[in-house]
Image (tube, rainbow, N blue to C red):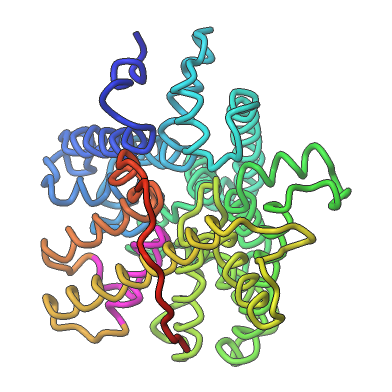
Amino acid sequence: MSIFGKLRKKLNTFQIIIIGFAAVILLGSLLLMLPFASSDGTVTPFKDTIFTATSAVCVTGLVVKDTATHWSYFGQAVILILIQIGGLGVVTVVASFSLLAGRKISLLERNTMQNALSANSVGGIVRMTRFIIRVSMFIEGVGTLAMMTVFIPAYGAKGIWMAAFHSVSAFCNAGFDIMGSETGKFSSLTSFASDPLIVIVVCLLIIIGGIGFLTWDDIVNHKFRIKRYRMQSKVVLTVSLVLIVVPALMFFLFDFRDMPMKERLLKSIFQAVTPRTAGFNTADFSLMTGPGRMMIIILMLIGGSSGSTAGGMKTTTLGVLVGNSWSIITNKKSTRLFGRRIEDSVVRNAVGILTMYLLLAIIGTLLISTIEKLPVDACLFETVSALATVGLTLGITPELKLASRFILIILMFTGRVGGLTVIFATVSRRKPPVSELPSEKITVG
């Protein structure tokens, strides 16, 4: 009997997803504690390995130990595998091994895969899984080859590993880097801020990984015939384009004015892309203007798209919320997007997700600020980065106390498995009420 089959009678699909992620995190934490996982051959404390493994599986990128200098090649390989599993999804990876073994996928497994991928139906889910694995490997391979042209001349044979690591990390929207041994601890990609190839390739990998597997399917099958795309894909592409162009223009005009034109343009584009939700950076965020940092926080909170390697509330959630607001303004009876009506249950889910993310961000910020005695704005940046699984930081993460790290771990885990998954895992077994309560009007606004 399969792993899913053994849990069939006790757990629902959302609970299986949560347990799967937790199990991978625990295993990764134990592997990173092995002496040969660190560069100096010592045992890394569990409090550091659990944070690192959670950040890797949840494709966040926040770290308490510099990935390049603290971890050995074995440790880095473990982190990279955790990133790959977390990016594609634990359920997708397990299902792919089942497919390779030639085993038939059960209905429970298909339902779990559907929820993990945010697919609309069970039909075609096995084909979609095969498609995801093939396309992911292809794109990561192309990204590796492209970055090798820069890293090999700069770092020799080590450049091959660096190219592969950063390609997978970028595509999975993880934000982990191994540049520390070359350019200083926690330096990310700042030394390549003016390199067009690295900046463009990493941006493309982040965008492709963050638009969602269903959108890939539409692009591959329908090419430029956008009218044939799913409504979800149209929302994803439209919102993503706006969230890249508008912030990039803002950063170009107000945050990087004193730089040469080439570096100014590249930094503006990169900082507009990476908060959703990659975690790489080519600029010092502490030197950005207040409005610039606030824009970064907003972009982090929104994140990527449903069924992608990215985290955050998701572009589709924002699209539905904006569509609902517009329907109220124009006195429409229902929310409409691209000539289609959005079901009320979807609108309620979007409102619930927004409320959940805002509450978690506020509570996490206040707790960490109180524990660490740090300014609220710095703690808000760090908290939203963890909750949206981004990984950008103002540099305070390595110095946080154990309690604050635990808060970030909870936020990263919740952000990766998804707010709705956590909710449904808790309440989905409750029977719906057989009657309705009496209604009464309340004034809002």
Tally the numbered discs.
0
Residue at 13 percent of width and 80 percent of height: 370
In this rendering, position of residue 175 left or right of residue 386: right
Identify which residue, 125 or 431, lies in the foreground: 431
The magenta stretch spans residue 383: yes
**Does residue 418 appear in this view?**
yes
Q: Position of residue 170 (x, y in %)?
A: 53, 51
Q: Please report the bounds of the magenta region as a residue range.
A: 378-397
Residue drawn at x 24%, y 70% as measured from the top left: 364
Q: Residue at x 36, y 69 (%)?
A: 384
Between residue 418 and residue 149, name the one nearer to us: 418
> From this viewpoint, is residue 385 visible?
no
Q: Is residue 415 above or below residue 159?
A: below
Judge by depth and name the residue closer to the eye, 41 or 229: 229
Residue sitting farthest toward the right: 225
Provide residue 321's location: percent of width, then percent of height. Answer: 57, 70
- When asked about the image quadrant of residue 141, the answer is top right
Q: Is residue 416 above or below residue 430?
A: below
Q: Is residue 166 above or below residue 95?
A: below
Query: Relative to residue 346, is residue 413 drawn left or right?
Result: left
The vertical placement of 374 against 349, above or below, is: below
Give how far across and how far down residue 222 sits, in percent.
84, 41
Q: Residue at x 70, y 67 (%)?
A: 241
Give percent across and percent down for residue 403. Answer: 11, 63
Q: Is 172 in the magenta?
A: no
